[in-house]
Image: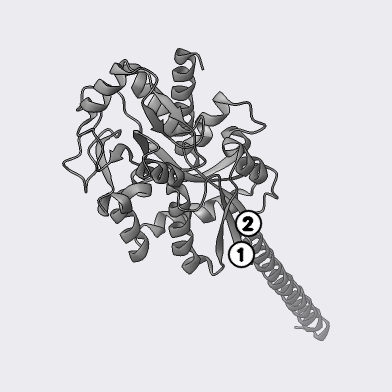
Amino acid sequence: MKRNTWLAILLLLAVGLLVLSGCGGQQEEATESSEKAGEEVKEAEEPAKLDYPTKPITLVYHSKAGSGGDIFLRNLGKALEKSFGQPIVIENRVGAGGANAWTYVSRAKPDGYTLLGISSTILASPLRVEMPVSYKDFDPIAQVFYDPTVIFVRTDSQYDSLADVVEDAKSRPGQQKWGGGNAGSAESLCALRFAEIAGMEIKLVPFEGGGDVIVALVAGDLDVAIGEYAEIKGQVEAGKVKLLTGLGSERIPTLPDLPTLKEEGYDFVFEKIRGLMVPKGTPDEIIEFWNEAIRKVYDDPAFKKYYESSNIIPLYRGPDEMTKAMDEQHQFFKEMLEKMGL
């Protein structure tokens, strides 16, 4: 083969190697670029860690310290502090049938640091008294319990049974004095509802909270009272208060001898909602943070001891289920008030 031919072949081989080397480099660069882009996408898909809570949290309630809702929030807060790593403070803002507390929280910054502890009162009170706020002005977090409601009297009362109460009320219309918390509260409306279906007329005396009702009853200023069992448990154990009936769909587990209102012959059931709400616009991430913590808190030994000994019934409902339950109970109150002309 001629020398020129060999030189041509060698030249072609050299060019080929250079081309292959360039392609490989480009391929490596493309691979590295693709991997880098994949890492960037992965980082973008991963949610940012929630920086919450970083300071104390305030739970606001509409009744005085010592009421069932106040006790519930203090025990819940104490249990959650362990996982939150921040103090949870209970603030009692009483007055205006609950509107003072509700208005305050509705106007708070929606950042998860000011929350509202609620009972069924927030569903009932705005129906009786014109208020600048209602339960629809908040976002729900979760229902945590339902609270057994009971009718009770002093231990030395002339009434030994619910039948005695009804008989006496019918014999002196409008004179039998009942205590049931705030005017327009769930308890007061339940008392009026019971009076209606029992065919009796009572005098309902308003109080700021359940604690005041108990004091007035024990002092002899009331004949009968209706309220949360959690509020009066201590007085029952001390022998100062006697239970007559419960308003739940079933008997209270630790009070198997206490009949329900339905068992007494009155077709009326009421189970009080206990839960938490936040100002409108609170981020979903914070609401879910609370839900996750609440789902776990039932197993906290101290908290479990509290709710079992207080006879409040665990019932977790997330935001959607809680909204449905509140809407149904709100409608119940509305219909009841319209029927009574209130």
For the residue labelled by badge 2, is the local secondary structure a helix, a strand or a loop? loop
For the residue pair 53 and 193, the one nearer the viewer reads as 193
Observer able to see residue 173:
yes
For the residue pair 122 and 324, the one nearer the viewer reads as 122
Q: What is the spatial separation of the Cα atoms under label 1 and label 2, in whole angstroms?
A: 7 Å
Give me the residue at 31% from left, 60% from top.
Answer: 305
- Residue 51 is situated, as x and y percent measured from the top left of the image, at 63, 64
Q: Residue furthest right?
A: 4
For the residue labelled by badge 1, is the local secondary structure a helix, a strand or a loop? loop
Q: How many marks?
A: 2
Looking at the rendered structure, the kind of residue marked 2 is Tyr
For the residue pair 78 and 22, the one nearer the viewer reads as 78
Looking at the rendered structure, the kind of residue marked 1 is Pro
- Residue 38 is situated, as x and y percent measured from the top left of the image, at 64, 63
- Residue 106 is situated, as x and y percent measured from the top left of the image, at 66, 42
Which residue position is annotated with label 2? 113
Give me the residue at 51% from left, 29% from top.
Answer: 184
Marks 1,2: beta carbons within 8 A: yes
Q: How is the image coloured?
A: one colour
Give me the residue at 35% from left, 31% from top.
Answer: 270
Which residue position is annotated with label 1? 56
Which mark, by number, is residue 48?
A: none
